[in-house]
């Protein structure tokens, strides 16, 4: 089931955020994610967030700032089971256009977004990590 995020689940969502980032971005120091944890924890409630819940367990979430996907994360033990696609499809229902940035070296995520109809608009450098990001867009 997909539903709106409730603030009392912030710790669970942040755990997924940290573990998924460390797992997906082995080319970035784990310290980077740990050092940004508190900042993200503070900013996350300002976004529109939907969670994927099975039973009483949150297994993933997507965060939006207007039409910008600030993040899509699935619990590392639950990936490749359709949850990320379900979350993305959920926000596609209410948006006519979406954009995001993804690290070029995160080939699994890049492939996912390409399969889901996103196109690469350009490349840019993330000054915080020194990594190349792809700017991607989807239009209904």
Image: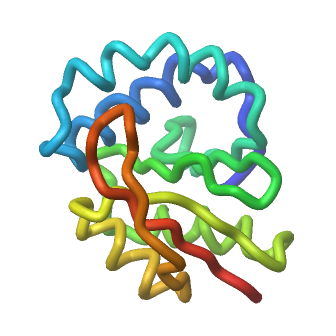
Return the residue nearer the eye: 68 or 129. Answer: 129
Return the residue nearer the eye: 107 or 62. Answer: 107
Give coordinates of residue 81: x percent, y percent: 36, 68
Give coordinates of residue 70: x percent, y percent: 60, 47
Return the residue nearer the eye: 91 or 132. Answer: 132
Q: Quadrant of the C terminus?
A: bottom right
Q: Is residue 104 above or below residue 2?
A: below
Q: Residue at x 54, y 23 (%)?
A: 40
Return the residue nearer the eye: 64 or 11. Answer: 64
Residue 103 quadrant: bottom left
Q: Is residue 18 above or below residue 136?
A: above
Instruction: Give the image's coloring scheme.
Output: rainbow
| Number of marks drawn | 0
Q: Quadrant of the N terminus?
A: bottom right
Q: Is residue 31 above or below residue 125?
A: above
Q: Residue at x 75, y 46 (%)?
A: 65
Q: Residue at x 30, y 36 (%)?
A: 129
Q: Residue at x 41, y 67 (%)?
A: 123
């Amino acid at each position: 089931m997909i539903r709106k995020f409730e603030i009392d689940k912030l710790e669970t969502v942040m755990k997924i955020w940290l573990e998924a980032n460390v797992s997906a971005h082995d080319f970035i120091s784990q310290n980077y994610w740990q050092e940004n944890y508190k900042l993200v924890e503070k900013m996350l409630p300002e976004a529109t967030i939907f969670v994927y819940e099975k039973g009483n367990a949150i297994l993933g979430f997507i965060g939006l700032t207007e039409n910008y996907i600030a993040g899509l994360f699935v619990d590392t033990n639950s990936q490749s089971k359709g949850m990320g696609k379900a979350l993305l499809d959920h926000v596609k229902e209410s948006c006519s256009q979406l954009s995001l940035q993804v690290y070029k070296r995160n080939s699994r995520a890049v492939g996912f977004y390409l399969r889901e109809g996103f196109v690469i608009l350009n490349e840019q450098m993330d000054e915080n990590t020194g990594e190349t990001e792809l700017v991607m867009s989807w239009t209904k």
